[in-house]
Image (cartoon, rainbow, N blue to C red):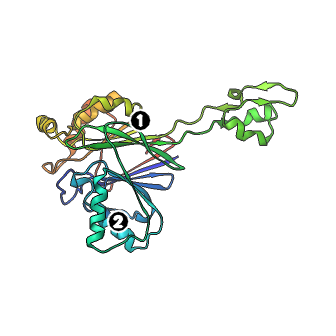
Amino acid sequence: MAFNLTILGSNSSIPTASRFPTSQLVEFNSSYYLLDCGEGTQIQLRKYRIKIQRIRAIFITHLHGDHYFGLFGLLGTMHLLGRNATLDLFAPPELKEMIELQLKVAKTKFQFELNFHPLTFGESKVIWEDDQVSVSTIPLQHRIPCNGFLFREHSHKRRIKKEALDTFRVPLQKIPKLKEGADYVTDNGEVIKNELLTHDPRKSFTFAFCSDTKFDPSIVPYIKDVDVLYHEGTFLESERERAHKTFHSTAAEAAEIAKMANAGLLIIGHYSARYSSIEAHLEQARKVYKSTELAWDGRKFEFRDNATG
């Protein structure tokens, strides 16, 4: 398993010279998925040498501009560069009208097929499956309808004990069934239990993306024991009241959610433009949950076989 997460934008609604609005690039075994597409996303993709035509699907959490204003330009660039592969777009239903209006006034028709998938809210359900992952929605509490997204690597097959194959003289053609959990039956009818021949499968890797949301413990069951959790931490504790009024979270509140969920790693981001430094966010979060890291533009997190790097 190879999972990479590149932070393209780590700020909230107002960009700064060093922090663009929200966008992240998820890579599962060389398959690319884009999470949110704030203003300037395609600039960041180019800056960090990410090939935009490899993006399989785009997931938009909600329709505040800092999460989708970069989409129109990105789609236009994909078109101009001759994309012909189908692109799947998951977003609130109103976004389809905006895209159609833009194409109409520009008298443009994409050369590639854009499959638009309108999202519903207030529930968790699987919205995407391919050969690498499944993606489910996470209901978030924000000022307008908003979804988070849970990426789950597909289940793995059982792992063969090579020494056991020799001990029980298992024919090679039986291995596929053993990996699926079947027992081995010898020519004389003896049943060799699967657990004697295989190890348990490796745990599937999970990543949860919780963008704009107030502090909401009700999401914990959806993200329990997740390997990596991105949770917004817009404000410091001194602005907790403001966070609640605007349906955002503080860094410490994000850490509380990670602690309740037993997340392997918490990544915080979506910083208010009022903060020139984000070190205090890390300090306040780590007081609650030590396994916390900061998102910043260009930072890349790499994971191999459930080990962080």
The residue closer to the viewer here, 298 or 113, is: 113
Tell me which corner region of the image, top left, top right, bottom left or bottom right, holds residue 96: bottom left
The amino acid type found where label 1 is placed reads Val
Q: Residue 69 carries which label?
A: none
Q: Is residue 43 visible?
A: no
- Tell me what residue is drawn at x 24 percent, y 57 percent: 20
Instruction: Kindly identify which residue carries mark 2.
Output: 75
Q: Where is residue 237 shown, x and y percent of the image?
A: 15, 35
Q: Where is residue 133 shown, x and y percent of the image?
A: 49, 46
Q: Where is residue 42 shown, x and y percent of the image?
A: 32, 64
Q: Is residue 226 above or below residue 59?
A: above
The mark that comes first in sequence, 1 or 2, is 2
Q: Can residue 225 be seen in this view?
A: yes
Label 2 secondary element = helix
Q: How many marks?
A: 2
Disc 1 and disc 2: Cα gap in Å?
31 Å
The residue closer to the viewer here, 59 or 30, is: 59
Tell me if label 1 and label 2 are in contact, CB under 8 Å.
no
For mark 2, does the 10 Å Cα neighbourhood hold few (<14), some (14 to 19), or many (20 or more) residues? some
For mark 1, does the 10 Å Cα neighbourhood hold few (<14), some (14 to 19), or many (20 or more) residues? many
Q: Nearer the viewer, mark 1 or mark 2?
A: 2
Q: Where is residue 21 shown, x and y percent of the image?
A: 24, 55
Instruction: Kindly identify which residue carries mark 1.
Output: 226
Q: Is residue 283 left or right of residue 26?
A: left
The amino acid type found where label 2 is placed reads Leu
- Tell me what residue is drawn at x 30 percent, y 66 percent: 73
Label 1 secondary element = loop
Tell me which corner region of the image, top left, top right, bottom left or bottom right, holds residue 193: top right
The residue closer to the viewer here, 143 or 149, is: 143
Which quadrant is home to the C terminus?
A: top left
Q: Is residue 126 left or right of residue 168?
A: left
